[in-house]
Image (cartoon, rainbow, N blue to C red):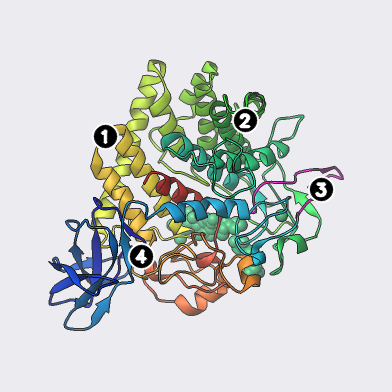
């Protein structure tokens, strides 16, 4: 039997999913400390879960609201099952919110980092000048966050992460200045300090002359399993891409608004950088996406079509006061083909979400179709969530980083709830948190260091070297395409939703990434 391993707030919908219960039966909610049964319920109808290809029953104990630590005990004809313990309380997500945000701090590059334990502390890394690919020119691009289990720094994935933090700051009351990062106590909310660390790096990734933005900085190939300071090969800046330039323009424009009062100088600088980047792509026909140049074998973030990045940039600049961007918005928005996405490849959700909520009447015709498309996609996610026994919105879409997609879907559902005021979307969004934190066919709480069964061997070089997982990281999750040798060897023939393995060699299911944490940070911020 599985349920969220973190738990529920008192008024949340609370469910448990039980396998091997063909005949049905009842279950008990047990106080973990006293061993007393505090609630008894009957399991619901027999259902089939497509993702795991299993028959299950659901127990709904939403009516029980008393704070405490509990587990669920079920006796069925086939087995005696106990869920891991979980809490009912108001602050159940606080620690995880802090640690998932602090993960970004621990991924910082180019400065001394004091980790959660000494194994995750490191001296300043990747500080050498980087060579611009195909030239003999070197530039300083130090700073920013290590992307994931590797130490590459990529503009598109960084921009998605920053966007999620800025949304969390703006949409929810995220004002803590005591999360335990070096800037804590400086009177600026830590979430903005953390975003700023990446934004300052991104500014260095812009080509001063053209305004175009380099796609990434990495070494030639992925490093061996070494610590950040020990990756000492020549750093190489890959060519400018439309995707990176569009994403850059969008988040810099957002930042110029959000930091306007907090840091007026930075705000102005960000706005100017955004405008310059936007000029570079405003009328470009180069929307095919990035491919790795000859000899570079690090993350590609290829994208297929960058109209959405340009649209997003136009929207954020429009909202930051550049009214002439309206024309570009009309030109790049295509309601017939654009689906909502929240990165790293499809940024349409950010563009539409922000324009729908922020535009005046001038663009009413555009925001009407954006709203229509948003609700169409949200309804599809809602339907998939309701169809899934585990409340998972993914349907058949278990690709690399599916846990990010589940969290992104949660964000889109929250957005739909905001736009319509309809609580059914919010409930479906909430289900995505439950799915990620344990109510899934694998029974994993996919955040390291949390829950009873959580990943202990992520593909994350510092964790691999430490011999234990850094706390507070969301792993990639099930990926039916089996895209690494280890996954191929052990997951062949598994149903899509089960294609996950907690082994550090399985980078296609068990890596971690800044932009997988960030949509979860957003969802937790809202709770
Ligand atoms: O888009 C297709 C979809 O149409 C199809 O149905 C599905 C089938 O599974 O595959 C989808 O494509 C996948 C694509 O991601 C988009 O989800 C590809 O199979 C998959 O290979 C690709 O994986 C990307 C991976 O890099 C390899 O390029 C991940 O999204 C991306 O998150 C990951 O990013 C890496 C960086 O390159 C390097 N740093 C670590 C980071 C995380 O693993
Ligand atoms: O560590 C790399 C990880 O960040 C990438 O997501 C992944 C896929 O591109 O590649 C990892 O590096 C592996 C490389 O692709 C193949 N040789 C083994 C490397 C580490 O396991
Ligand atoms: Zn580094």
Q: Quadrant of residue 74?
A: bottom left
Label 2 vs 1, first from the N-terminus: 2
Instruction: Tell me the residue at 44%/31% (across/down).
Output: 354
Q: Give the spatial CA distance, label 3 vs label 2.
A: 24 Å
For the N terminus, give its image quadrant.
Answer: bottom left
Q: Quadrant of ligand 2?
A: bottom right
Residue 174, disc: none
| Tag 4 residue | 5
The answer to whether residue 394 of the structure is visible from this angle is no
Q: Name the element at disc 2.
A: helix
| Tag 1 residue | 421
Query: Within 10 Å of the Cα at label 4, are there few (<14), some (14-19), or many (20+) other Cα atoms?
Result: many
Magenta part of the chain: 124-147
Query: Within 10 Å of the Cα at label 2, are there few (<14), some (14-19), or many (20+) other Cα atoms?
Result: many
* Magenta stretch encompasses residue 307: no
| Tag 2 residue | 281
């Amino acid at each position: 039997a599985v349920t969220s391993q973190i738990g529920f707030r008192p008024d949340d919908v609370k469910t448990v999913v039980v396998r091997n219960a063909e005949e049905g039966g009842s279950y008990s909610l047990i106080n973990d400390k006293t061993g007393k049964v505090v609630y008894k319920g009957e399991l619901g109808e027999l259902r089939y879960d497509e993702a795991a290809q299993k028959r299950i029953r659901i127990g709904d104990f939403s009516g029980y609201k008393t704070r405490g630590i509990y587990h669920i005990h079920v006796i069925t004809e086939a087995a005696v099952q106990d869920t891991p313990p979980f809490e009912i309380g108001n602050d159940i997500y606080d620690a995880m919110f802090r640690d998932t945000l602090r993960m970004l701090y621990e991924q910082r590059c180019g400065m001394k980092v004091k980790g959660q334990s000494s194994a995750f502390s490191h001296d300043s890394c990747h500080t050498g000048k980087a060579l611009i690919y195909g030239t003999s020119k070197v530039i300083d691009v130090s700073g920013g966050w290590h992307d994931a289990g590797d130490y590459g720094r990529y503009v598109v994935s960084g921009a998605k992460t920053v966007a999620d933090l800025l949304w969390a700051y703006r949409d929810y009351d995220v004002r803590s200045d005591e999360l335990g990062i070096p800037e804590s106590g400086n009177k600026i909310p830590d979430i903005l300090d953390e975003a700023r660390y990446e934004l300052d790096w991104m500014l260095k990734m812009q080509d001063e002359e053209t305004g175009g933005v380099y796609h990434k900085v990495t070494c030639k190939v992925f490093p061996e399993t070494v610590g950040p300071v020990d990756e000492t090969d020549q750093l190489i800046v890959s060519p400018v891409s439309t995707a990176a330039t569009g994403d850059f323009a969008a988040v810099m424009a957002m930042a110029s608004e959000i930091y306007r009062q907090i840091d007026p100088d930075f705000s102005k600088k960000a706005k100017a950088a955004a405008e310059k980047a936007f000029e570079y792509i405003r009328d470009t026909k180069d929307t095919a996406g990035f491919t790795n140049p000859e000899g570079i074998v690090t993350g590609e973030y290829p994208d297929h079509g960058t109209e959405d990045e340009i649209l997003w940039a136009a929207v954020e600049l429009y909202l930051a006061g550049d009214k002439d961007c309206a024309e570009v918005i009309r030109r790049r928005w295509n309601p017939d083909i654009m689906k909502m996405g929240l990165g790293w490849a499809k940024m349409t959700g950010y563009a539409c979400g922000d324009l729908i909520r922020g535009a005046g009447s001038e663009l009413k015709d555009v925001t009407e179709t954006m709203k229509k498309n948003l609700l169409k996609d949200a309804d599809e996610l809602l339907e998939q969530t309701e169809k899934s026994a585990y409340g998972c919105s993914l349907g058949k879409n278990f690709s690399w980083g599916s846990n990010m997609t589940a969290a992104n879907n949660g964000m889109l559902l929250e957005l739909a709830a905001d736009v319509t005021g309809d609580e059914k979307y919010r409930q479906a969004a909430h289900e995505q948190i439950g799915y990620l934190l344990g109510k899934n066919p694998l029974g994993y709480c996919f955040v390291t260091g949390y829950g009873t069964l959580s990943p202990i061997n992520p593909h994350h070089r510092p964790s691999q070297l430490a011999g234990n997982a850094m706390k507070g990281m969301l792993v990639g999750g099930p990926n039916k395409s089996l895209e690494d040798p280890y996954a191929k060897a052990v997951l062949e023939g598994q149903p899509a939703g089960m294609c996950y393995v907690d082994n550090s060699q399985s980078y296609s299911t068990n890596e971690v990434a800044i932009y997988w944490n960030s949509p979860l940070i957003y969802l937790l911020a809202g709770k």
